[in-house]
Each structure stands twice: as structure tokens, then as C-alpha cells.
Image (cartoon, rainbow, N blue to C red):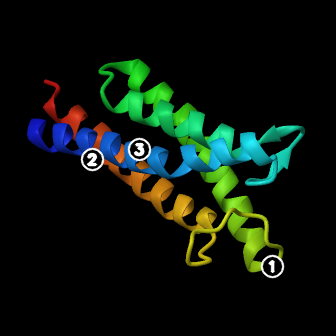
Amino acid sequence: MFLLSRLLRLGIGAMSLVILAGIVPISLLHYQTGSACPVVWSVPMCYVVSICYAAIGISAFWFGKPMGWLFVAGIVPVLLLALTGTSLELLGNETCPRSDTGWPLCYTSLMVGLSLALAFGLVFWSERQDRP
């Protein structure tokens, strides 16, 4: 179980970095143009998502109870925003930033967020199995 936990943590950290590599350019574009991502209460949501994925990435390499709290603090806003954006997209409101192919990025964020939540659950489970 020890190896499984470490591999899952590595995967969570790597996936967070991949997502950050995609969202940071959108955040920078929004900073330059002011129109690259949705804004709620004067806060660009791409900034919020960037901070949340950074927290998720940091939590993957932080051991102990703070890992869980930091992960949850990052994943909950990501999933809520992704669910909201996906719902609005499915209802016909184009609210999410798009990829070069036109794919709404909130769909990707929802899939990745759910995958990360599953991986975190497996990390939590495997580390509990290792305790006496």
C-alpha cells in the first residue's frame, strides 16, 4: 500500500502541474485583455482555479493531516466551478473558456477534478491501511 500511495501522490502532483500549465496562460491572457475567463464578483475564475490547482499540487507532497485539508480546500471550489460551468454549457450558455478545438475547458476541469478526488480517496484509503 505504501507504493500505491506514493504513486498516487505523484500522479496528483503531476496532473496538477499539467492543468496549471494550461490554466496559467489563460490567466495571463485574462490579465492582458480582461476577457479570457468568466468573472464573478469582480474575481476572474481562472485565477481562482489556478490557485486551487496549485493547492492540490502542493497537498500531494505534504504528508499528514494538512495534506487532506489543503487538498479539500483546492478541490471543492474546482468541482463547484466545473459543475456550474458544465451545467451552464449544457443549457446553452457559453461561459467557459475554450480550447483551440472549441472544447469547453470546464468539461476538462470536471473530469480532472473527479479523477483527482478519486485518486485522493485512494491515497487516504491506502495510507489508513498502512497504519497499525
Q: Earlier in the sequence, mark 3 or mark 2?
A: 2
The disc labelled 1 sits on which kind of residue?
Answer: Leu
The residue at the far front in this view is 32
**Can the viewer see residue 125 in this picture?**
no
Q: Which mark is residue 122?
A: none
| Residue in view at x 24 percent, y 40 percent | 10
Answer with left or right where residue 29 lies relative to residue 10. Answer: right
Q: Residue at x 32, y 19 (%)?
A: 64
Q: 37 and 80: which one is in front?
A: 37
Question: Which amino acid does the dot numbered 2 rest on?
Answer: Gly
Q: Which disc number belongs to residue 11? A: 2
In 3D space, how far apart are the residues under numbered discs 3 and 2 (Cα atoms)? 8 Å
> Helix or strand or loop: what does disc 2 sit on?
helix
Which x, y percent locates residue 9?
Answer: 27, 39
The answer to whether residue 106 is above or below residue 65 is below
Q: From the image, which quarter does the N terminus lie in?
A: top left
**Residue visible at 36% across and 49% down?**
15
Identify the image quadrant of the C terminus: top left
Identify the amino acid type marked 3.
Ser
Pointers 2 and 1 in contact (C-beta within 8 Å): no
Going by the image, does 12 lie left or right of 24?
Answer: left
Which residue is nearer to you in this view: 101 or 38?
A: 101
State the image coordinates of residue 102 (x, y, percent, origin top left).
62, 77
- Which residue in the protein does label 1 denote? 91
| Mark 3 lies on residue | 16
x 17%, y 26%: residue = 131
Q: Position of residue 107 (x, y in %)?
A: 58, 68
